[in-house]
């Protein structure tokens, strides 16, 4: 059985033979920024801590004190909290009092999450999807957390909506946690993408996947093909191309979990494309389902750092200026060649 420690010891890996905790890695990375104050380092470390706390709950998610709808009482008469609410609260509470953030925003809340008045504010902004793929919780399928960190734009005082609505290309750091057969944290500060696996016995994230690059030869395409009839002609034709129907390319295998983090993670390591196009099935989702600031921009940042691409079909995700917190966009992400092909076919058929 290969462990996180074994993987980081592979020859060819700069960290070969070393056991590197996430804390050590983040601190080492900070050395390459002479002006760094350590604030960003501390935020990343707090996110790793939140990930461990959430992971400890997700591994017990089948137990009765967690499952059930919010507001219900368990046998002890305590109010039962749904796991997505628990994750949301955990991330907020670990970050609200540190003096590092000006404001936060979570996919679970309509409006921005101000730092409470009795705590001081700092230079950064944190946006997060506390539990992605939450419809999969009750059936024991992988779920995740996505985070995005920006520098504040406003000069002082409490952070505002303006601080939260920034282009993905201005991200300072982004990443995700996947709660799967093991828990992993994958992040980038703009110098490559690095993955850490949680050793649940010692409670540490250990470097297991340094400098992740999307493999050049893709294996998978990932889309909810049940909705094919609601897609544009260009997206339908592109899907047929991925299936090798026009004989110009070999067919790719279809893999779709329905947890964006898990689908993205698999394709990042194995090569492929994930897409959630706009469709006509739901009047609320005519511009796609996934949310720009909480899901698409941070994953686009990681994809580009790993040599891939992410677009709406026509525009680069990282160039989009969000106008609202919960804005949805069509999303194509993965191997650069496959994303470019999607763009070409969408432009010529739509
Ligand atoms: P969330 O659980 O944060 O609301 O996100 C759900 C998203 C995403 O994780 C997933 O890829 C997508 O919804 C699945 O949608 P379909 O069920 O329509 O395929
Ligand atoms: Mn989500
Ligand atoms: Mn969510």
Image (tube, helix red, strand yellow):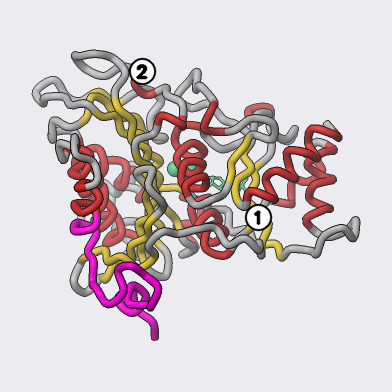
Q: Residue at x 47, y 47 (%)?
A: 305
Tell me if 37 is positioned left or right of 5 in this view: left
Q: Is mark 2 within 8 Å of ligand 3?
A: no
Occupied quadrant, residue 143: bottom left
Q: Position of residue 203 (x, y in %)?
A: 20, 67
Q: Residue at x 22, y 30 (%)?
A: 101
Asked whether disc 2 touches disc 1, contact meaning CB atoms under 8 Å apart, the reply is no
Whether residue 193 is situated above or below residue 5 in the rendered picture: above
Q: First in sequence: mark 2 or mark 1?
A: 2
Extreme residue in the right direction: 246
Instruction: Report if residue 24 lies within the magenta region.
Output: yes
Tell me if 24 is positioned left or right of 344 in this view: left
Q: Residue at x 78, y 55 (%)?
A: 242
Dot 1: what SS? strand
Residue denoted by label 2? 161
What range of the chain is rendered magenta?
Answer: 1-25
Residue denoted by label 1? 222
Category of crowding for the residue at label 1, using alpha-carbon neighbours closer than 10 angstroms: few (below 14), some (14–19), many (at least 20):
many
Q: Position of residue 284 (x, y in %)?
A: 63, 28
Q: Position of residue 271 (x, y in %)?
A: 60, 61
Q: Quadrant of ligand 3?
A: top left
Whether residue 1 is situated above or below residue 260 in the rendered picture: below
Give 238 or 50, whichever is nearer the viewer. Answer: 238
Category of crowding for the residue at label 2, using alpha-carbon neighbours closer than 10 angstroms: few (below 14), some (14–19), many (at least 20):
some
Give 234 or 83, whichever is nearer the viewer. Answer: 234
Instruction: Report if residue 86 lies within the magenta region.
Output: no
């Amino acid at each position: 059985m290969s462990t996180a420690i074994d993987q980081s010891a592979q020859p060819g890996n700069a960290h070969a033979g070393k056991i590197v905790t996430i804390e050590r890695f983040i601190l080492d990375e900070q050395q390459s920024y002479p002006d760094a104050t350590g604030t960003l380092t501390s935020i990343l470390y707090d996110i790793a801590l939140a990930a461990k706390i959430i992971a400890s709950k997700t591994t017990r998610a089948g137990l009765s004190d967690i499952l059930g709808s919010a507001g219900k009482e368990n046998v002890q008469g305590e109010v039962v909290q749904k796991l997505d609410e628990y994750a949301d609260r955990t991330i907020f509470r670990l970050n609200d009092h540190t003096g590092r953030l000006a404001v936060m925003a979570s996919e679970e809340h309509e409006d921005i999450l101000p730092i409470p008045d009795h705590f001081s504010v700092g230079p950064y902004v944190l946006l997060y999807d506390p539990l992605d793929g939450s419809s999969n919780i009750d059936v024991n399928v992988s779920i995740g957390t996505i985070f995005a960190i920006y520098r504040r734009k406003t000069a002082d005082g409490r952070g505002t909506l303006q601080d939260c609505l920034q282009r993905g290309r201005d991200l300072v750091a982004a990443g995700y946690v996947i709660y799967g057969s093991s828990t992993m944290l994958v992040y980038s500060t703009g110098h490559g993408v690095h993955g850490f696996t949680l050793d649940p016995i010692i409670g540490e994230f250990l470097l297991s996947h340094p400098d992740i690059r999307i493999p050049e030869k893709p294996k998978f395409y990932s889309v909810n093909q049940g909705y094919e009839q609601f897609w544009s002609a260009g997206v339908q034709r592109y899907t047929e191309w991925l299936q090798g129907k026009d004989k110009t390319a070999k067919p790719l295998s279809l893999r779709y979990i329905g947890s964006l983090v898990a689908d993205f993670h698999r394709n990042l390591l194995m090569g492929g494309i994930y897409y959630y196009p706009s469709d006509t099935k739901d009047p609320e989702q005519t511009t796609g389902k996934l949310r720009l600031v909480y899901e698409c921009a941070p994953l686009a940042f990681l994809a580009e750092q790993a040599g891939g691409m992410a677009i709406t079909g026509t525009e680069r995700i990282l160039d989009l200026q969000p106008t609202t917190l919960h804005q949805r966009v069509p999303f194509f992400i993965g191997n650069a060649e496959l994303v470019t092909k999607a763009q070409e076919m969408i432009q010529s058929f739509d």
